[in-house]
Image (cartoon, rainbow, N blue to C red):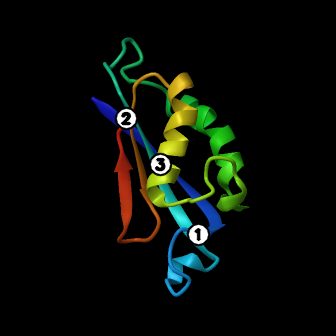
Amino acid sequence: MEIFKVFHIEAAHRLPNLPAEHKCSRLHGHSFRVEIHVAGEVRQPAGWIMDFADLKRVFAPVFAALDHRYLNEIPGLENPTSENLARWIWQRLRPTLPGLCKVVIAETCTAGCVYRGD
């Protein structure tokens, strides 16, 4: 069984490794949609894998580090592609979120990535 919780992060970034004429090399922002997926057995007597409130609590420091920030200034996100953002989030959640199985990033309504760990 797998559950997920969705978070929305507003942030600015630029992709410094692209040619200067590429639109993503310029400073711009996104309303990132972040899904955190947790897999596990449904525990009784609660009848759930985990409390969504606990998932929100575990994600809170990550949210605070990213929301309304310039991602390029965050250590480890100097080249903040969606792929690198998903990996960065995974690395911060994995130690404290047993069952973490997937991080999904959508940077627009039609484009994003899925990270399932290394």
Label 1: which residue?
A: 16
Q: Amino acid at mark 1?
A: Pro
Residue in the picture at 56% in, 59% down:
80
Q: Amino acid at mark 3?
A: Ala
Residue in the picture at 58% in, 34% down:
92
Callout in the foreground (1, 3): 1
Query: Is 1 on the left or on the right of 37, as rendered?
Result: left
Marks 1 and 3, Cα distance to the nearest angstrom? 18 Å
Residue 117: image x %, image y %? 38, 36
Q: Is residue 6 visible?
A: no
Callout in the foreground (2, 1): 1
Callout in the foreground (2, 3): 2
Quarter of the rendering occupied by the N terminus: top left
Which numbered circle lies on residue 118? 2
Which numbered circle lies on residue 31? none
Which numbered circle lies on residue 86? 3
Q: Is residue 60 visible?
A: yes
Q: Quadrant of residue 103?
A: top left
Q: Classify 10 Å Cα crowding around label 1: few (below 14), some (14-19), many (20 and above).
A: some
Query: Is 64 on the left or on the right of 93, as rendered?
Result: right
Q: Classify 10 Å Cα crowding around label 2: few (below 14), some (14-19), many (20 and above).
A: few
> Could you tell me which secondary element the residue under label 3 belongs to?
helix
Instruction: Name the N-terminal-most of marks 2 and 3.
Output: 3
Instruction: Name the N-terminal-most of marks 1 and 3.
Output: 1
Residue 19: image x %, image y %? 51, 79
> Could you tell me which secondary element the residue under label 2 belongs to?
loop
In the image, residue 67 above or below residue 2: below
Q: Amino acid at mark 2?
A: Asp
In the image, residue 20 above or below residue 5: below
Marks 2 and 1, Cα distance to the nearest angstrom? 24 Å
